[in-house]
Amino acid sequence: MSKKIVVLGAGTAGTIVSNNLRRHLPADWEITVIDRDDDHIYQPGLLFVPFGVQKSSTLVKSRKKYITAGINFVMDEITHIDPEKKEVKTKNHTFTYDFLVISTGCRIAPEENEGLMEAWGKNAFTFYYKEAADQLRLRLKEFDGGKLVMNIAELPFKCPVAPIEFVFMADWFLKKKGVRNKSEIELVTPLPMAFTKPKAAAVFTESAREKNIKITTSFELNRVDGKEKFIESVQGDKVKYDTLVIVPTTIGDPVISNSGIDDGIGYVPTHHNTLKALKHDGVYVIGDATNVPTSKAGSVAHYEADVVVFNIMAEIYGAKPEEIFDGHSTCFIVYSKGTASLIDFNYKIEPLPGKFPMPKLGPFSLLKETKMNWYGKLAFEPLYWNVLLDGKHLGMPPTLVMAGKEVG
Ligand SMILES: Cc1cc2nc3c(=O)[nH]c(=O)nc-3n(C[C@H](O)[C@H](O)[C@H](O)COP(=O)(O)OP(=O)(O)OC[C@H]3O[C@@H](n4cnc5c(N)ncnc54)[C@H](O)[C@@H]3O)c2cc1C
């Protein structure tokens, strides 16, 4: 065996898995991680940018700086993946591998939504990437009343709680600005409820009702009309807006579909529990690039990284990969500048109330708006840069822990 591991993408998942692999593998295993640029963005911070709570420039750091010594970091565009030949092509090089980890994430594709590009930056905005979040900040600065609509174009999309956080933060922001009584806020989602999980959706819906935020469900976006300022569903329902904030259609990176290894919408068919690519030997998939039915979230990428490292090690030592991953996801949900909630769940177990991570002590409360959860959300950023990206554990297993949760 040539002892080569290639990791595609050095975002959240690729950085964590590479650093973790380097820590566990002997030095004769060569690890190469490839990304198109050197800008690692702390994406959860993008939520705060439109409200002036965080500057976008503080969210970007050099990828190289967070990749451990002893890993080759290559800056190049990945152009083709050939799992049969065990080969990856970039614009400038060809790499062979024994194990491949695909962590190319996903991206929003506003060009896929009819009419959206004509309205883009005029009355339709997003906060899902840095420049757009800044543009939305300028729009909200000028906003002095009217109808603010947050729409999710299509499933799946990245960070399913972010649109809910956005409307809660908008309520806080417009109150602070003194224009809340002249404004309407509406969340328009293709989901049959406010969130993917019914119990948490009921809690979020009640919070939205208290904040006078309207939620329109089961709305499958057909088109955006930026001239007349409305969105229209496939069924012909219309929602009018003054300012539209949208999570456009989200797709996997084109290199996945161009290499013919996708599920039809750019994600790699992945075993839900081993995280091995279903159709290709020696290939693991992690983070937003998978099609596993859990949230596309950084916390998930972190939990998955432990499983992928374990299973690559198992295969190297001649054992079979184990079915460890349970869809575990943990997310703070910001309610205002100063309060947040927290959810912890997996494929089978819905978010439950209780304390996290320590039973009875917390300090964080599940499915409950508290100040302490807000401090947790803030603390997460330095933790991300200094501990999590390094592939370190916080003494927690990658799978859901029931201790501290109130069942029934
Ligand atoms: C607004 C917002 C708020 C969020 N809030 C939270 C939160 O509160 N909590 C949470 O857990 N998660 C949150 N997330 C989601 C989280 O940031 C992502 O799920 C996570 O970053 C996924 O990691 P990844 O490595 O799979 O993808 P990414 O971090 O996006 O990395 C993918 C990498 O692959 C590279 N790449 C892709 N294709 C190619 C190619 N062809 N050639 C070269 N390089 C390539 C890209 O450049 C990129 O660096 C949020 C996301 C957004 C947008």
Image: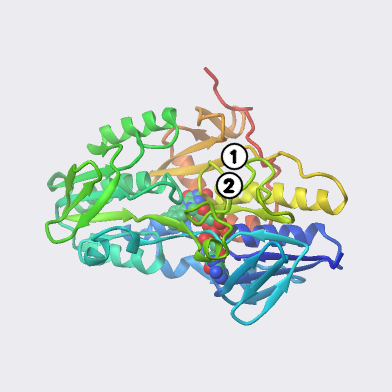
Q: Secondary structure at mark 1?
A: loop
The colour scheme applied to this rendered structure is rainbow
Asked if residue 266 is positioned above or below residue 183 in the image, the reply reads: below
Give 75 or 68, whichever is nearer the viewer: 75
Q: Is residue 165 left or right of residue 403?
A: left
User: Residue 16 appears in which quarter of the rendering?
Assistant: bottom right
Disc 1 + disc 2, Cβ < 8 Å: yes
Tell me: residue 117, above or below residue 408.
below
Taking depth in this image into account, of 169 and 287 the one nearest to the observer is 287
Q: Is residue 49 left or right of residue 187?
A: right
Tag 1: amino acid: His
- Which residue corresponds to mark 2? 300
Report whether the residue tagged 2 is closer than 8 Å to ligand 1.
yes
Q: Residue at x 26, y 38 (%)?
A: 216
How busy is the neighbourhood of tag 2: few (under 14 within 10 Å), some, or many (20 plus)? many
- Say which residue label 1 marks: 328
Q: Residue at x 71, y 73 (%)?
A: 95
Establish whether ligand 1 lies closer than 8 Å to the Cβ of label 1. Answer: no
When the figure is inspected, residue 201 is found, relative to residue 72, above or below; the finding is above
Q: x%, y% of residue 284?
A: 68, 54
Pointer 1: residues within 10 angstroms few (<14), some, or many (20+)?
many
Residue 379 visible? The answer is: no
Image quadrant in which you'd find residue 204: top left
Q: Position of residue 383 (x, y in %)?
A: 59, 55
As drawn, is 151 to the left or to the right of 10? left
Amino acid carrying label 2: it is Val
Left or right placement of residue 305 versus residue 138 in this view:
right
Task: Identify the element where label 2 is drawn.
Answer: helix
Q: Quadrant of residue 9?
A: bottom right
| CA distance separating discs 1 and 2 | 6 Å
